[in-house]
Image (spheres, rainbow, N blue to C red):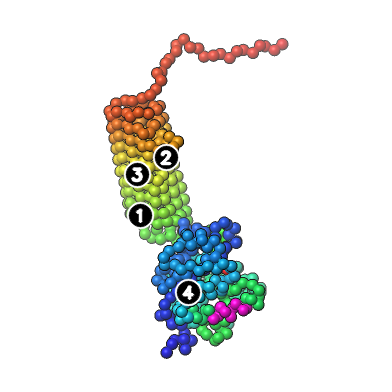
Amino acid sequence: MHLWSFGLTDVTASLHVVVLAAGKGTRMRSRLPKVLQPLGGEPLIAHVLRRARALEPHSVTVVVGHQAEGVVKTVGADDLRFVEQAEQKGTGHAVSLALAGQDPSDRVLVLYGDVPLIPESDLAACLDSDARLVVLGAEIPDPSGYGRLIEHPPGHLERIVEERDADAGIRRIRRINTGILCAAAGDLQRWLTAGESEAVRRQGEWYLTDVVAAARSESLPVALVLSSRPEAVLGVNDRAQLAQQERQYLRARAEACLRDGLALADPARFDLRGELVFGRDCQVDVNVIVEGTVRLGDGVRIGPGCRLRDVTVGDDTVIDAYSLLESCEIGPGCHAGPFARLRPGTRLEAGARVGNFVETKNATLGPDAKANHLTYLGDATVGARANIGAGTITCNYDGANKHHTSIGADAFIGSNSALVAPVVVGDAATIGAGTVLARDAPPGTLTLTRSPQVTRSDWERPRKTPRPAKD
Ligand code: UD1
Ligand code: CA
């Protein structure tokens, strides 16, 4: 006998997730569709899809509409099915499109593309219920903007009233609809069809939320699950809400890092927008941003205001204040910054140092090599222990092509030298200050280009011509 005859849902039926992502998000006032707005370094919808996948459902259908192409391009994957909602006629319309062709006994969980941070435990609680319709609600201090839950009798959800349709009494209700609900596909489709005629009568939007009243009118059990973390199930409709959710998300991630042993100067001022792996006793000062994948060894110290994107940092290295590092590999015992800019392809080997106002790109510094101030090293290899004086520039670009500079071990480049690539500085070579090096410098010698210094003892400083005295 089918469970439906008892008015219950078959919780073992195969699960299908529908994600609504067709809306424009007018209130964001952005060229980017709302579900692609970044939260913690990832589009809103990516957070939703991660949660959907964690449930290991049979299928995930994403309803796209506004800038559908962009959304598909950003999150498209083999395990996703996309359904286009050409005209955004409302959440009810969107779900009904997604249900076309679905087996009526399949279980469907609806998630909203603009509700990114739903706790997994809330979804599990919804899926545990065998009521014919399960709605995830939340009790929040400021319910404005949300659909309100009307319970009659208390604890029994009777219907959902959207804010725009609510009178003053209903607006005072602080229990809101998160948008997340779960039911059998056949039930949803039937209830939605009832809602469609209602929408046509209203000449307005086709609300998904009308399924509650439709289920109740069939005297079917409707369960209300209240979120265990109400602040996490709020929707993102405008930039203020996006900023709030982002703060909440980053704060939670920072706290997870603290629990795992990362010494954060202030968890409220640490933005982990990617993946961070760290060893023991790493310290991170305030206002540090981590993007992409960053790996820190043991005892790494990161000064205030640094941004690290796709970087590996070895044990006991210091990244000093206000340094920007992208796609680099930094060995152990190195020191970078303050104010260093290490661009893609930079590699610092053990003990290398790069100081203030030094920019590197596609450059390797060998063990204990130093470039302590005001230098550009692009397309360069620097040998072990070499010392690059202040103001050294590798002239790697001739206006058309890039060329390599190779500096040997123990070389010493005098300040303010221009190394015109392609050029090789031999091991232990010394380059005099102010040299424009256009040919290779042999190892172990002094090379310099400099006009001879002269002193003129017969020279006199010009004197100011006295003004004629006025009468
Ligand atoms: C919706 C709910 C409201 C709830 C709130 C929770 C309805 C009618 N109202 O309101 O009860 O409190 O979410 O955050 O469902 N979308 C489509 N196609 C459409 C319209 C919307 O795919 O035609 C998508 C949007 O991209 C968005 C989601 O559905 O991801 C919700 O739409 P939105 O317009 O933000 O609904 P709310 O007004 O927030
Ligand atoms: Ca919304």
Q: Amino acid at mark 3?
A: Arg
Of the image marks 3 and 1, the number of the one nearer the N terminus = 1
Please name the residue shown 61% across and 72% down the image: 205
Disc 4 + disc 2, Cβ < 8 Å: no
Please name the residue shown 67% across and 11% down the image: 469
Helix, strand or loop for the magenta stretch, by majority: helix
Tell which tag, 4 or 2, sits nearer the viewer. 4
Of the image marks 4 and 2, the number of the one nearer the N terminus = 4
Q: Quadrant of residue 78?
A: bottom left
In the displayed structure, would residue 301 be above or below residue 451?
below
Residue 347 numbered tag: 3
Disc 1 + disc 4, Cβ < 8 Å: no
Tell which tag, 1 or 4, sits nearer the viewer. 4
Where residue 452 appears, as percent x and y from the top left, is 40, 18
Q: CA distance from mark 3 to mark 2?
A: 12 Å
Of the image marks 1 and 4, the number of the one nearer the N terminus = 4
Say which residue label 1 marks: 278
Q: Amino acid at mark 2?
A: Glu
Say which residue label 4 marks: 109
Work out which residue is located at the far right of the displayed protein and give it. 471
Asked whether, in this view, residue 387 is left or right of residue 24, the answer is left
Q: Which residues are magenta?
A: 190-198
Residue 359 numbered tag: 2
